[in-house]
């Protein structure tokens, strides 16, 4: 299928003069600074939403593709939610946070209470709670969905300035869970919490033969699992985590509850990582051997098993400007899809900038979740920006081609990452698409929470 390529802009390396607000990756301007408001209370948020005739977009940590947030016209406003943060209250099995609270703050507040979210974290925690919910941000583990599935109640300022609480019994809750910022401004979220567990994470390097079957077993037989597939070497680096045995938990606590790394290491990934680093160096031209992109794979060298809480084990990413693409397919099709990818890889010998990141999650109840009502396997791809703000042609060709392969397989893209919208017939891929649109018409009939991107998506 021929696709109009719009999604991969260069990154600006110019110094920010403060006149415009950029997205986190620095590859898109979002708004003139004079069009940005930063409310600190729900009342100020209501005023920010209702003042003036223009349209409004809500911005969290601005880590999604710029088009999600970019204002369309003169008079439109961007609401920066960074001051709407903090813990608002706790219950025995719940905690309420302001919508602009970073996930890191959520985890930092819950951990000393011995609590955690029932959904495991993604690789980083600098996203805001509302931004993570709005895009279906997820971690790994079949016994859980996305962060939005940890929500018990979502409080929103609507376009008319009224405030509405959507709890799990509300018929529009599955729309509010993953709202793409088009339903209202999320001022607070109540999350279910569970006891924080200590995990023992085993790391291994295995052949990618029967990868689909292996992926399913790693995820069925363990609480949490994540894998990195290096198709050129037919190799997989896999992490599988279970609740730690009592003796390991004691050792972890004796160490002050810091991540415990076993002394015994394995060099089984070292040659593969050296080859990956050679590709990355060629693509990014970053001279510093300790550059952030290199550290994201260097940590796989001389790997060892670890013991820690879910955040210490899995939320260890190194945020570095990148183009990320992540496509979800139903877990029951993972065997076939891996076979299709292997055949495509063998046929085209694509340039591999970075391994394929494999995570599986349980079903999500959010209508627009790529994991809606089904166990899902997520295929993640990353290309890091070069020092001069460019992107390697080989890396970009790979991303475009692999997305087409997965879109043809019925894949659904992560809303908070990059994707080629023309590849997808949304209404055909999402059984509750029209229900979501109906809720949107009820809550925001004038489409105040919109921009060019959401117009193209829904109108
Ligand atoms: C380095 C990196 C690592 C990542 N790792 C993962 C990962 O491990 N797992 C994963 O699933 N994803 C991951 N992502 C994707 C990321 O989680 C999403 O892009 C997420 O949306 C970012 O949150 P944010 O606060 O930056 O939201 P923004 O980018 O600011 O906004 C995203 C959307 O949320 C809406 N929104 C924001 N605040 C509100 C509000 N208060 N009310 C209503 N709508 C709102 C916006 O309008 C927009 O539509 C990663 C992204 C990067 C760049």
Image (tube, helix red, strand yellow):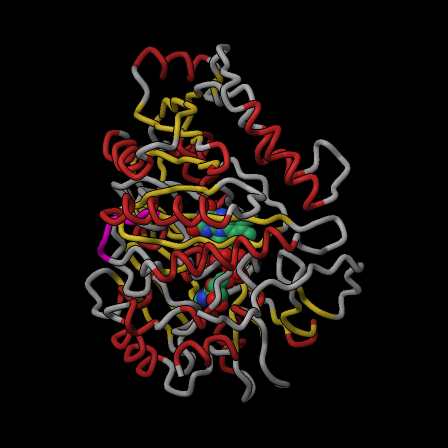
- Total label count? 0
The quarter of the displayed image where residue 24 is located: bottom right
- In this picture, residue 361 sits left or right of residue 349: left
Q: Main secondary structure of the magenta part?
A: loop
Q: Where does residue 265 sit, x and y in percent of width and height? A: 50, 14
- In this picture, residue 13 sits left or right of residue 263: right
Which of 448/237 is in front? Answer: 237
Residue at the location (66% across, 35% down)? 278
Q: Where does residue 134 sit, x and y in percent of width and height? A: 41, 62
In reply to whether residue 376 is colored magenta, the answer given is yes
The quarter of the displayed image where residue 107 is located: top left
The quarter of the displayed image where residue 234 is located: top left
Residue at the location (72% across, 55% down)? 389
Q: Quick check: 40 above or below 325?
A: below
On the rendered image, what quadrant is the C terminus found in? bottom left
Q: Quick check: 196 above or below 321?
A: above
- In this picture, residue 287 sits left or right of residue 106: right
Which of 392/26 is in front? Answer: 392
Q: Quick check: 366 above or below 254?
A: below
Residue at the location (21% across, 69% down)? 171
Q: Is residue 431 visible?
A: yes
Q: Where does residue 268 sit, x and y in percent of width and height? A: 49, 20
On the rendered image, what quadrant is the N terminus found in? bottom left
Q: Where are the magenta residues, as a range?
A: 373-377
Q: Is residue 98 visible?
A: no
Q: Where does residue 375 sit, x and y in percent of width and height? A: 25, 48
**The furthest residue to the front:** 347
């Amino acid at each position: 299928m021929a696709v109009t390529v719009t999604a991969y802009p260069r990154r600006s390396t110019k110094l920010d003069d403060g006149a415009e607000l950029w997205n986190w990756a620095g590859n898109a301007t979002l708004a003139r600074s004079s069009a940005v408001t930063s409310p600190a209370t729900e009342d100020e948020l209501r005023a920010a939403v209702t003042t003036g005739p223009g349209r409004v977009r809500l911005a969290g940590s601005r880590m999604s593709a710029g088009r999600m947030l970019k204002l369309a016209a003169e008079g439109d406003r961007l609401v920066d939610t960074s001051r709407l943060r903090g813990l608002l209250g706790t219950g025995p099995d719940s905690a309420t946070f302001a919508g602009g609270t970073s996930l890191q703050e959520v985890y930092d507040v819950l951990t000393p209470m011995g609590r955690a979210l029932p959904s495991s974290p993604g690789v980083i925690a600098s996203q805001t709670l509302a931004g993570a919910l709005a895009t279906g941000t997820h971690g790994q583990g079949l016994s859980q969905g996305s962060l939005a599935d940890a929500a018990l109640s979502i409080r929103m300022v609507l376009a008319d300035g009224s405030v509405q609480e959507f709890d799990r019994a509300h018929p529009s809750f599955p729309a509010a869970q993953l709202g793409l910022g088009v339903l209202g401004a999320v001022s607070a979220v109540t999350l279910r919490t569970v006891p924080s567990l200590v995990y023992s994470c085993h790391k291994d390097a295995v052949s990618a033969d029967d990868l689909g079957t292996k992926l399913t077993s790693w995820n069925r037989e363990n609480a949490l699992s994540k894998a990195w597939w290096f198709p050129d070497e037919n190799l997989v680096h896999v992490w599988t985590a279970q609740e730690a045995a009592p003796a390991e938990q004691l050792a972890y606590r004796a160490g002050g509850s810091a991540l415990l790394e076993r002394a015994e290491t394995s060099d089984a990934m070292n040659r593969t990582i050296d080859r990956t680093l050679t590709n990355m160096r060629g693509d990014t031209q970053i001279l510093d051997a300790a550059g952030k992109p290199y550290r994201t794979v260097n940590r796989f060298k001389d790997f060892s098993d670890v013991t820690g809480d879910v955040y210490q084990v899995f939320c260890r990413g190194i945020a570095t400007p990148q183009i990320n693409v992540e496509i979800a397919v139903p877990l029951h099709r993972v065997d076939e899809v891996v076979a299709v990818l292997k055949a495509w890889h063998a046929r085209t010998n694509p340039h591999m900038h970075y391994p394929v990141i494999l995570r599986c999650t349980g079903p999500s109840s959010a209508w627009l979740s790529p994991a809606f009502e089904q166990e899902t396997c997520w295929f993640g791809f990353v290309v890091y920006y070069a020092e001069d703000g460019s992107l390697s042609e080989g890396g970009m060709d790979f991303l475009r081609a692999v997305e087409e392969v997965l879109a043809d397989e019925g894949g659904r893209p992560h809303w908070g990452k990059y994707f080629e919208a023309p590849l997808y017939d949304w209404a055909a891929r999402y059984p509750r698409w029209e229900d979501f649109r109906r809720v949107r018409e009820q809550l925001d009939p004038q489409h105040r929470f919109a921009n060019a991107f959401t117009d193209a998506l829904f109108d």
